[in-house]
Amino acid sequence: MFMAVLLLLAGVLSGCGGGTNAEAGSGTAVSDKKVDLTLTMWGSEDDKKVMQQRLEIVNKTYPNIHVNLLLVAGDYDQKVQTMIAGGTPPDIMMIAENYQVYASKNQIIPLDDLIAANNVDMNERYSEDIGNIMKYGGKYYGMLDRAGAMVLFYNKDMFDKAGVAYPAKDWTQKELLDAAQKLTVKEDGKTVQWGYYPGSWWPQWMQLVYQNGGSLFDANNSPTFDTPEVRNALQLLNDMSFKYGTSPTPPEIADLGNIGADPLFAQGKIAMETTGFWNIGSLSKVEGINWDISPVWGQTNAFFNGLTITKSSKHQEEAFKIIEALTTLEAQTPIIESGQDAPATKAALSSDAFLNAEYGGKKINMNAFADSRLYDQPLNPKWNEMMKVIDDKLGVYFNNKATLDDTVKQIQEGLDKLYK
């Protein structure tokens, strides 16, 4: 996504300096002169408007720190890397799963000293599993801004008609399969309603691995893909499509228009799916579907982004003041009010505004996000390369065109080479 406007970006991104002799809030001293910072983010124009609203809240506390907000369209990582290499880096960067790539290249700084100097209690601000998401080498490299767990969306009318109890966080994979079988409906030998849509997307199979007590790496950071825990997770997903018929097969998905799980759920074709917060906003605009959400059984993962500070920033202390202030309840509230995403902090996730929000004129179980248990995601500097090794083989397996044994062995060999 990203490239031709770099010279233009360079002009926008230059910042100006200031002194260091005045206190602003608790902790480290910040400038009593005007300081300009640049914050890069991805998303839509609506996302940018929400962030601008939040920065206006922060500006009441730090009127001398002005933040230029830059919405980067296209290939975000490629463009910000070019900005860094070109000597016009942002001060603050929004980063998600690949933050460890930047940390391993020493392009963003650990925040531990700034956290301590500003008396920020990370255990008070975040739940333990969310707070640790952006750690690398035992150090914090970002302040989590948004962090919505994968949750289970389910069609209440379908459950009621089948006489199946609604999902609960203490479900097991067996209870998932049992419910999916009861919720699958055939007419004249053809399936017209599936119980569950697992898909082959990494969060959907990876959560099953960790629920089984498995992982992708051992304590020595060696790959552990060829294990019973991984095999059982992959076998379950394939069986749900090709053995039990409770999930659509790739040919059936093609017949349905290749439109994906979220639209199929909205159309009443599937009774359950696991996905992220974004589907709430979509479903709130759909009439005639009686739905709710539940925590995923066992453990799941979170979709997140955090705010980081670049090594090249000349105003790291001021930048920290801004990202710390953006993760307070007041500055996270616009995320909730816009229905944009799930906020990351304890205070926001437990706030009345979040828990009692209405979507499409109805309240849903927003406690599902705070009630979710997150596994320690295997994020690492070679995440993108790792996923390519895995996806190239799993794509064949989930089309039932390769054996489980060949698949896991080939992936294990590929990961061993990658991490040798």
Image: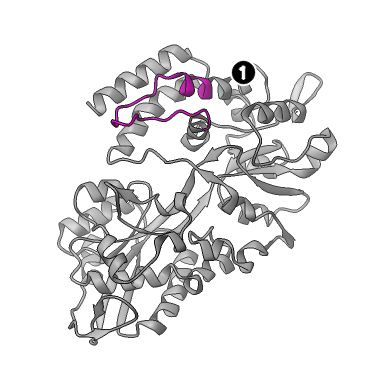
Circle 1 sits in a helix, a strand or a loop, which is it?
helix
In the displayed structure, 117 sits above or below 264; it is below
- Nearer to me, 111 or 18: 111
Q: Quadrant of the C terminus?
A: top left
**What secondary structure is the magenta-colored segment mainly?**
loop
Who's the residue at 66% across and 46% down the image? 294
Quadrant of residue 255 within the rendered picture: top right
Does the magenta-highlighted stretch encompass residue 73?
Answer: no
- Measuring from the top left, give residue 158's x and y in whole percent: 79, 38
Quadrant of residue 268 within the rendered picture: top right
Instruction: Say left or right for 267 vs 188.
Output: left
Instruction: Say left or right for 411 vs 371.
Output: left
**Does residue 252 appear in the picture of this structure?**
yes
Colouring rule applied to residues: one colour
**Does residue 402 appear in the picture of this structure?**
no
Count neighbours of disc 1 (C-alpha within 10 A) and say few if under 14, some if 14 to 19, many if 20 or more.
some
Which portion, as a residue range, is magenta? 211-234
| Residue type, label 1 | Phe
* Residue bearing the label numbered 1: 242
